[in-house]
Amino acid sequence: MDKKITFNELRKIKDSLPDGSIRQLAQEFDLEVETVRNYFGGANYDRGKSVGIHIEPGPNGGVVLIDDTKILERAKELIAEQVH
């Protein structure tokens, strides 16, 4: 399932994650840590891979089309867990 989100919204989700969440997401999805960072708008393709996000320029940092929302949905769960 794909999803459109602004780049700024995507970065806000990343910035709201509890400490250690990027590493946890990498372990849960069997990915390199840098690949998960790239999912949230990073650009380290020497150590990480592209993960199916497409960024188009525009307001609020541009529009991001995410091909697979599993990491995004899990990240939102981790944020919700820290609130409770």
Image (cartoon, rainbow, N blue to C red):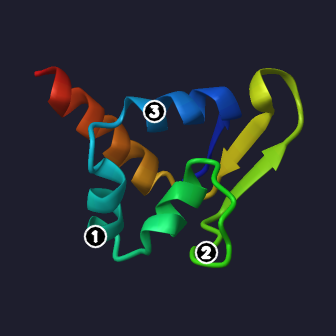
Please report whichever mark, 3 or 1, sits nearer to the chain's N-terminal start. Answer: 3
Q: Where does the image place residue 32, in percent across and percent down from the top left? A: 44, 74
Secondary structure beneath label 1:
helix
Q: Where does the image place residue 9, in percent across and percent down from the top left? A: 59, 27
Separation of disc 3 and disc 1 at Cα?
Answer: 19 Å
Image check: 59 left or right of 20? right
Residue at (63, 53) in percent of width and height = 42
Q: Where does the image place residue 34, in percent across and percent down from the top left? A: 51, 66
* Neighbours of disc 3 within 10 Å: few (<14), some (14-19), many (20+): few
Please report whichever mark, 3 or 2, sits nearer to the chain's N-terminal start. Answer: 3
Vertically, is 82 above or below 3? above
Vertically, is 12 above or below 31? above
Residue 47 position by quadrant: bottom right
Q: Where does the image place residue 6, in percent across and percent down from the top left? A: 69, 30
Q: Nearer the viewer, mark 3 or mark 1?
A: 3
On the image, numbered disc 1 is attached to which residue? 27
Secondary structure beneath label 2:
loop
